[in-house]
Image (tube, grey):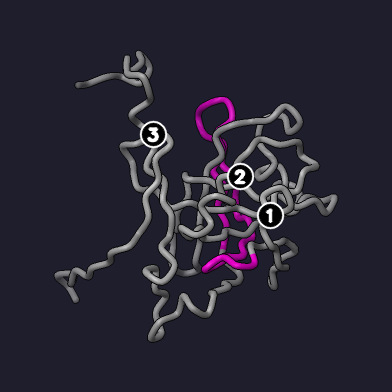
Amino acid sequence: MFYRPEDGHGLPHNPFNAIVSPRPIGWISTRGADGSNNLAPYSFFNAVAYVPPQVMFASTAAKEDRGDTKDTVANIRETGVFCVNIVEYAMRDVMNVSSATLPREVDEFAHAGVARADCTSIDCARVAAAPASLECRMTQIVRLEGEANFVVFGEVTGVHIRDDALVNGRFDVTTFQPLSRMGYRDYTVVREVFELARPDD
């Protein structure tokens, strides 16, 4: 099969959503200039640089009460900061609850029953029980082709790691099993890890 996206694929569901997978989930927490908290998962998320450490996520939809984007990007425009919380398998249901489209004044932490804690290097809340949280200062917001497509880049200014996720001095994903997005309504979880030696090791 070959198709040009501009012509449509003719399938019941868009295959592009599932081709680039699995994708890590950035559970992004923000705080608006008015002090309101927001929490939402994004599967267009990844780390993009080591020194200084930097991450990105993309938002691809808009809400009527936020104009050309959603609460997350709107809050980051106001404050310049955000926090990326890593989603473990045990948090899959509350993460999903927090993905609901809600009015801007609704606190998704409270709506989903997620305990929050204050960040250290930025004025923002984080998921208290997350295996890891990355406090970030926004470096740029890039508008992409399309009606409501934005990529947010941030420099990591603080890192929280849950004690049980550190095993023999390494961040051990098998202890908490990170959740990833596969496309459609499908997800997967990391339960097996193996090493490959690089040719220049």
Looking at the rendering, which quadrant does residue 137 occupy?
bottom right
Q: Earlier in the sequence, mark 1 or mark 2?
A: 2
Q: Earlier in the sequence, mark 1 or mark 3?
A: 3
Residue indicated by mark 3: 17
- How many angstroms separate mark 3 from mark 2 (CA)? 21 Å
Say whether residue 116 is left or right of residue 173.
Answer: right
**On screen, 12 above or below 159?**
above
What residue type is disc 1 on? Gly
Q: Residue at x 35, y 31 (%)?
A: 16
Dominant SS in magenta: strand
Range of residues picked out in magenta: 128-155
Circles 1 and 3: CB distance less than 8 Å? no
Q: Residue at x 36, y 16 (%)?
A: 8
Task: Report if residue 127 is visible in the image.
Answer: yes
Task: From the image, state whether disc 1 or disc 3 is nearer to you.
Answer: 1
- How many angstroms separate mark 1 from mark 3 (CA)? 29 Å
> Is residue 3 or residue 185 the one in the foreground?
185
> What residue occupies the far bottom of the structure in this picture?
168
Circles 3 and 2: CB distance less than 8 Å? no
Helix or strand or loop: what does disc 1 sit on? loop
Q: Residue at x 66, y 37 (%)?
A: 70
What residue type is disc 3 on? Asn
Residue indicated by mark 2: 97
Say whether residue 134 is left or right of residue 8.
Answer: right
Q: Residues within 10 Å of mark 2 (few under 14, many from 20)?
A: some
Magenta stretch: includes residue 26: no
Task: Report if residue 76 is visible in the image.
Answer: no
Helix or strand or loop: what does disc 3 sit on? helix
Residue indicated by mark 1: 113
